[in-house]
């Protein structure tokens, strides 16, 4: 087998392994954990839980996922310079930010001290796990990602069976993410890196801040359904919209990690971008998403009724549009890795700001007269603007 064919076979195998890992993780959270929480909590309590977990995920994406991506992007620079350090210092700063964020959530939602403490632990552990999993991608060791997701999924399901209550629910997420962090700590050396700075700290910090700002806008908008709907239409409406869109967001959990595989390969020193590769990657993702959207049209109502019988009636009118918005968002996530590697993070920030402005303005205009239906159209419009902007930037730069 030629080198090129061997490389193609390896990349294909990594995609398959990563998709399988994501399917297992998605099944545990979306098919077992969240329906179990929905069944045991009132509609209002469940809507509040979704809002808080959405905000917690904003923090996790802002800190842990940003560190993960910048580690991948900057890794070749550190190897070329022969330097090792900086990232554990950045992790400490991110942990301090996480504690402040959790205190704000405690003050806003008025949880008991036990729930607040568990929520703080969950956010801290999730941030560390998000960052540390970059080491699997640096090694291109996607089998370990599969093993980690199997372990995390088992921990999530076991914890949900025992701790799915109004006060202890953060423990479900803490134990799930904690299992993954322990596995990464045992199989990589991320925790043994020196707690020291290098001459690259300023450059890395600058890129990290730019990516964090872009990530903040993107993640806030990812969970905008909870953060906009909650104060406007109430906690119950959060439950209805999240239930309507769960099928598409589950696909996002399955497909978006493919972007992690791409970024892992793009982080290698011998990677070269091209218009042809950009078109191929995004053409394939659009084809897959088109097939998924057809399946969503046929199967999403049935799955939604099966998993969320108490919420289905109120969610049914929004299922297709909510999932269409989710699919458009996934297409944008698939387009971003090559742009992140080869273009300035300022471009990502500009696109995210345009995306955010479109989302918020259209939501504020459409929600008063049309309620959740207006929010669905706002998500579709904003996602389409972002996707077109990413495609335009990609074909211009490569």
Image (spheres, rainbow, N blue to C red):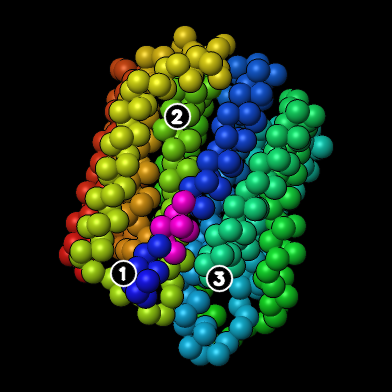
Mark 2 or mark 1: which comes first in sequence?
A: 2
- Rendered residue at 52%/67% (across/down): 140
Query: Is residue 116 in view?
Result: no
* Secondary structure found at label 2: helix
Magenta-tinted stretch: 10-16
Say which mark, if any, is on residue 139. Answer: 3
Mark 2, residue position:
247
Instruction: Give the percent coordinates (x, y) of residue 131.
Output: 60, 61
Question: What is the distance, in whole Å, between disc 3 and disc 1 at their CAs?
Answer: 23 Å
Report the front residue among 323 and 96.
Answer: 323
Is residue 151 shown left or right of residue 64? right
Taking the magenta stretch, the answer to whether it contains residue 297 is: no
Q: CA distance from mark 3 to mark 2?
A: 32 Å
Residue pictured at 50% horizontal, 14% vertical:
305
Which circle, 3 or 1, is nearer the viewer? Answer: 3
Q: Does 218 sit left or right of 118 as displayed?
A: left
> Which label lies toward us, 3 or 2?
3
First in sequence, mark 3 or 2: give its number. 3
**Residue 234: percent from left, percent from top:** 52, 21
């Amino acid at each position: 087998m030629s080198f090129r064919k061997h490389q193609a076979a390896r990349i294909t195998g990594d995609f398959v392994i990563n998709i399988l890992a994501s399917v297992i993780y998605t099944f545990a959270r979306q098919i077992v954990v969240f329906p179990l929480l929905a069944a045991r909590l009132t509609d209002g309590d469940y809507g509040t839980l979704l809002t808080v977990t959405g905000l917690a995920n904003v923090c996790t994406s802002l800190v842990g996922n940003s560190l993960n991506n910048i580690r991948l992007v900057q890794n070749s620079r550190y190897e070329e310079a022969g330097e090792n350090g900086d990232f554990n210092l950045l992790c400490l700063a991110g942990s301090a930010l996480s504690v402040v964020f959790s205190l704000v959530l405690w003050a806003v939602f008025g949880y008991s001290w036990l729930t607040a403490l568990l929520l703080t632990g969950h956010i801290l552990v999730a941030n560390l796990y998000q960052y540390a999993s970059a080491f699997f991608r640096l090694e291109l060791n996607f089998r370990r990602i599969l093993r980690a997701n199997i372990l995390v999924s088992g921990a999530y399901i076991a914890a949900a069976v025992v701790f799915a209550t109004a006060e202890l629910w953060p423990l479900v997420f803490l134990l799930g993410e904690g299992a993954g962090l322990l596995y990464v700590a045992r199989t990589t050396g991320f925790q043994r890196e020196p707690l020291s700075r290098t001459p690259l700290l300023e450059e890395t910090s600058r890129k990290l801040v730019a990516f964090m700002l872009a990530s903040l806008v993107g993640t806030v908008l990812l969970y905008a359904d909870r953060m906009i709907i909650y104060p406007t239409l109430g906690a119950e409406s959060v439950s209805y919209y999240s239930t309507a869109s769960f099928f598409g967001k589950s696909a996002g959990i399955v497909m978006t990690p493919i972007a992690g595989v791409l970024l892992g390969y793009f982080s290698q020193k011998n990677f070269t971008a091209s218009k042809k590769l950009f078109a191929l990657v995004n053409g394939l993702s659009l084809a897959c998403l088109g097939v998924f959207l057809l399946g969503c049209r046929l199967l999403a109502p049935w799955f939604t009724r099966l998993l969320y019988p108490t919420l289905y009636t109120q969610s049914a009118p929004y299922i297709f549009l909510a999932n269409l918005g989710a699919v458009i968002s996934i297409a944008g996530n698939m387009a971003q890795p090559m742009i992140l590697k080869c273009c300035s993070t300022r471009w990502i920030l500009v696109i995210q700001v345009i995306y955010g402005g479109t989302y918020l303005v259209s939501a504020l205009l459409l929600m008063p007269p049309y309620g959740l239906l207006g929010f669905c159209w706002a998500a579709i419009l904003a996602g389409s603007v972002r996707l077109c902007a990413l495609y335009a930037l990609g074909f211009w730069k490569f």
